[in-house]
Image: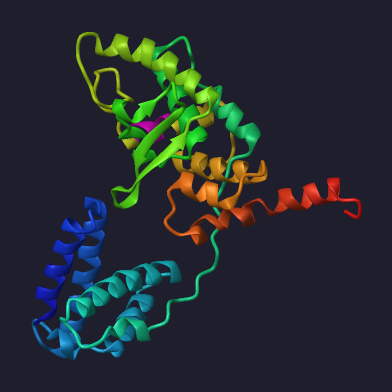
Amino acid sequence: MNLDEAIDHYLNYIVVEKGLSKKTLEAYSHDLATFAEFVSVGAQRAVPILNELNEQHLLKYLIWQKKKGLVARSLARHLVVLRNFFKFCFEEKFTKEDISQKVDSPKLGRKLPHAPTRLDVDKLLNAPDLKTKRGQRDRAMLELLYASGLRVSELVNLKMDDVHLTEGYLKTYGKGRKERLVPMGKFAICEMKEYLEGVRKKILKQNVSKFVFINGSGKVLTRQAFWKRIKFYALKAGIKQNISPHSLRHSFATHLLEGGADLRSVQVMLGHADISTTQIYTHVSRKHLIEAHEKFHPRG
């Protein structure tokens, strides 16, 4: 089997079997096409034979990408794609071995996420003008984002059937369409009730929408539109640090851990497949833990 045929099989697999998003599919397709092009030039063959490849092809490819200016994190992402691909090829018996296992991952520096302080979060949540329909909607979105730790894509794609105000939770679908249940909190529930029973009904009138958050025309609100609203409110509130929808997700996790929540619970609420992804927030909260130790420990 040649490399292009194997890539086609793999891309079909991750769509049908894995249920990955269109965005992820495009990223995988681009990375694998880039690798195939690089290998074909080196092998001086239009379409390389899959079983003729070895770990040296992978190493040369990563070195080539590094010379182009890719940082360690980006190189690691490329290697993840290739490892998933060659693992698939080996499991499907397209190859005799998984050559990617012989290549070490680039060493990554730990990048700590920026989490707005509680004071900045309060300023942001209080920035919308509740005298306007848009302000009431935006306040509900901000409260829900901070209370639940949703990704912005999960927030704007939230459907009416997924919101359970009486029970106090919502249902969302994260990466790989994995379902999870997330508590909403009393403040978010209150704002959501105000929005759903007031503003949303007034905008829709006799029309119907399956989406929770809509614009003035009754259509689903886009990620870009909400991102602009957050930037507007951060500026209005006089917040100097850069704030994005993802910043509130970081604050959600950081403030939970600072309040005493266990790491496993935060992992489930964030929808992280691996707890090591969640552990980055323990580093963000280290200053808080030191301060708590100094304040409460008899020998602090």
Estimate the x, y position of residue 261 in percent, counting from the top left. Answer: 62, 44
Queried whether the magenta region covers residue 228, the answer comes back as yes
The stretch of residues the image draws in magenta is: 224-229
Would residue 276 be found to the left or right of residue 97 on screen? Answer: right
Q: Quadrant of the N terminus?
A: bottom left
User: Is residue 276 placed above or below 97 in the rendered structure?
Assistant: above
Can I make out residue 238 in this image?
A: no
Asked which colour scheme the image uses, the reply is rainbow
Estimate the x, y position of residue 155 in percent, counting from the top left. Answer: 37, 35
Please give the name of the residue rendered at 38% of the width and 84% of the height, measured from the top-left corner: 103
Report the front residue among 228 and 33: 33
Would residue 40 be found to the left or right of residue 24 on screen? Answer: left
Please give the name of the residue rendered at 54% of the width and 60% of the height, measured from the top-left corner: 111
User: Is residue 296 placed above or below 78 in the rendered structure?
Assistant: above
Queried whether the magenta region covers residue 202, the answer comes back as no
Please give the name of the residue rendered at 60% of the width and 49% of the height, measured from the top-left corner: 262
Residue 29 quadrant: bottom left
Estimate the x, y position of residue 54 in percent, counting from the top left. Answer: 26, 89
Give the dominant element type of the magenta stretch: helix, strand or loop.
Answer: helix
Can I make out residue 53 in this image?
A: yes
User: Is residue 106 placed above or below 295 in the rendered structure?
Assistant: below
